[in-house]
Amino acid sequence: MGAVPSTPRRSERHWEAAENLIGALVGEKSFPISSELWKRILELPLNLQWPQDRITMACQNLVKNNYHTRHLAKILIHMVWCLQDCMSASSESSMIYTKAVNATFISSVFLKFAIENSKSVKFEELSLSLDEAEEGQDVIPSGQSVESFVMQGVLNFIGASEVSPHSCLLHHELLNFMLVAMSTQLCSGPSPGPKDVHPFIDATMLQEPALVASVVRRLLLNFVTRARIPYNVAAYPVYSDGNQPGVLQRVGSAAANFVLLPYYTFNYLVSSSADGFRSPLADNSLLVLLILIHYRKCIAMDEPIADNSLEEVDSVSYTKEKSYFHDNPYCKALENALDVEFNSVDIEGNTQNGPLVRLPYASLFDTLGLCLAEESSVLLLYSLVHGNSDFLEYVLVRTDLDTLLMPILETLYNASKRTSNQIYMLLIILLILSQDSSFNASIHKLIVLNVPWYQERLLHNTSLGSLMVVILIRTVKYNLSKLRDVYLHTNCLAILANMAPHVHRLSAYASQRLVSLFDMLSRKYDKLAELKNDKVIKATSESIDGESIAEEMSTELHIYTDFLRIVLEILNAILTYTLPQNPEVVYAIMHRQEVFQRFKSHPRFNELLENIFSVLDFFDSRMDMQRMDGEWSVDKVLQVIIINCRSWRGDGMKMFTQLRFTYEQENHPEEFFIPYVWRLVLTHSFTFNPDAINLLPMEYPIDVSIKQYIHVLASYYLLSNVIVVAWLWITKMAEQDTLYKVGQSL
């Protein structure tokens, strides 16, 4: 498929014409950007078949000849011109949209192959420029690069054009194109550096604020509305009449591993067997948005900044080897997005500056609740509740918190079937929500009639707060037996600690689980203490240095000592602040009081256990005062507790500082989020040459877990009761605003 003549005879078949035209596109001869060749290529119906080897050969030839022909840059420019025609057309012409779809698809195919097979870290094979003769013809605005012109055109169409039955396919192909254009990140290392070159996404970051806001809004609306492509073959001649793929539609199964193809996308969208709520347009919109908001451009301190770049440096910018991170406008747009029902003047009367993204928070909230089984939706929810204070406030005042919490708790219940990333993200979301006292109070007022996915026992008419306690404790139990991840323990206990002072009418089952949590951790503590003594004795008998072994074992033992103390503080908070409203907790402690007895003289626990034993003494004495005919039953004991809860005054109880844990993101989140987002992209319909991937630490598909990421940076250790982890810190705050660090980032 070399230099094939570009003017086929009229008598030739359609496939021969297509062969000639595509051959000219990838051949050695350079055709001017004004050549009739481009118009004829874009008007091809693309309903003929090519074998895999011909498609791969076409891509190889275009890349080989591109430095001379600059055909890749020219087809990209024609794609933008087609998009401009679509936007300026008075009516939705079928041929105009067909040309735009074809231009976008062909650009994606060849651009992806060029990126995957680039030998240069600067992607010089793309040759994103025109020759001198054509540069002087005002093909693109003076002073603007090809990549900037292309991304501006693509983003203009996405942000300004409504998704209609006629334009839906084009929107989807443009999102595919953006995934391809931004996939240069896969070829770079996991830690962004000043020498990284990403021409298209860097150009995307330099667009005007109004355009950025319109794109973020459109991508989120696509996620919410979940549009589907209607079956209308006449409007899309890119498809064949039968079930055979077209000229370039075979590329998806070729060795080159190209993007998801329109034909297969179309069949998936209109398939009667597909999940009615699934929408590839919505999925790709979300993936593109996540890539955009989590990208960080590292710039050398002495590197000049373009005039149209943003002036401000991100608040998390840092100086490292004379470099810093540039502000991300898409992240800022998401963080400042407001509800469509919210007035432009905030509650303090301050007018918001610059273009704002306005979204229907209610629809976004409901859609997130329906989609949290997808990791990408979980990451969006995290990005919103962590970065957008207005959306977080909206979530906290909703009276139907079960819309979000029930799918979150169900996913945690099925933790063994989920990735560790998804579990950690959900726990962090719960931790952020639990920082609000009104949230902790309201979840105990919401009653869940039944929980069909909970298999251990029937749960009827239980409060959402009680269910949350049960699931968090179950997560700790699963982690203790399977994962043995200290950070997961810390996060679960932090959420429970935030909830504790606001617990109201905790169910009998949740109360039992809470006491059994202390018992479970205490048994782990006993095993570690016994193992430590055995190892030290063995090392001493074998003349091995026992000090290092003892120090190693002491670290883990100290960690579980802290965990036990947190559980005791949780119980103390309930007994101190809400005992009259929680008779089931009192019953559970009385029923299992032997688990606390052996720690009564422990120096780390004795002061916390004093309150527990004060409660036990009070209710035991009331039990002794009761005259009972026959045996004590559960109902009779509970009735005595309920009656005496009314006379409980808390005399002699020690008041401890109320626990409050908060979440803060680590200083360099891009080192986790950029690989994580691209791992999500790769698990969807996007494929990439594994040999070209440097962003992810091993062959994909990869579970780039937060746990693994933490352990890369630092191992856990204790220092003055401080559990040090990477990627986030959790801070225990006293009422006097003093800080006691339970975890901090390195």
Image (tube, rainbow, N blue to C red):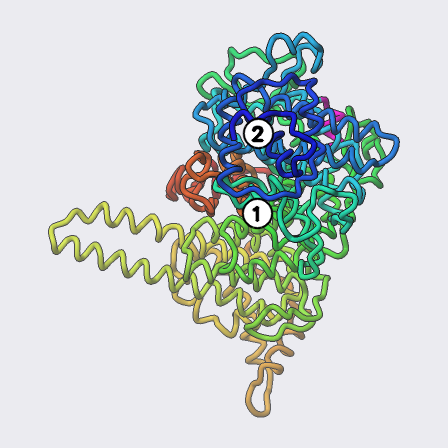
Residue 560 visible within the image: yes
| Residue located beneath label 2 in the image | 23
Residue under the point 45% across and 23% down: 120
Rendered image quadrant of residue 399? bottom right
Q: Residue furthest front?
A: 11
Is 70 or 17 nearer to us in this picture? 17
Q: Give the mark nearer the N terminus: 2 vs 1.
A: 2
Q: Distance from label 2 to label 1 (Cα)?
A: 32 Å
Q: Kindly report the secondary structure that dominates the magenta region of the rendered protein.
A: helix
222 in the magenta segment: no
Residue under the point 79% across and 27% down: 85
Residue 221 position in % (x across, y down)? 75, 42
Rendered image quadrant of residue 271? bottom right
Q: Is residue 608 above or below residue 250?
A: below
The magenta-colored residue range is: 208-215
Q: Which amino acid does the dot numbered 1 rest on?
A: His
Is 350 or 281 nearer to us in this picture? 281
Q: Secondary structure at mark 2?
A: helix
Residue 149 position in % (x across, y down)? 68, 20
Q: Is residue 116 above or below residue 209?
A: below
Rendered image quadrant of residue 163? top right
| Residue located beneath label 1 in the image | 684
Query: Which quarter of the rendering shows the C terminus?
Result: top left
Q: Which amino acid does the dot numbered 2 rest on?
A: Gly
- Check contact, mark 2 vs mark 1: CB within 8 A: no
Mark toward the viewer: 2 or 1: 2
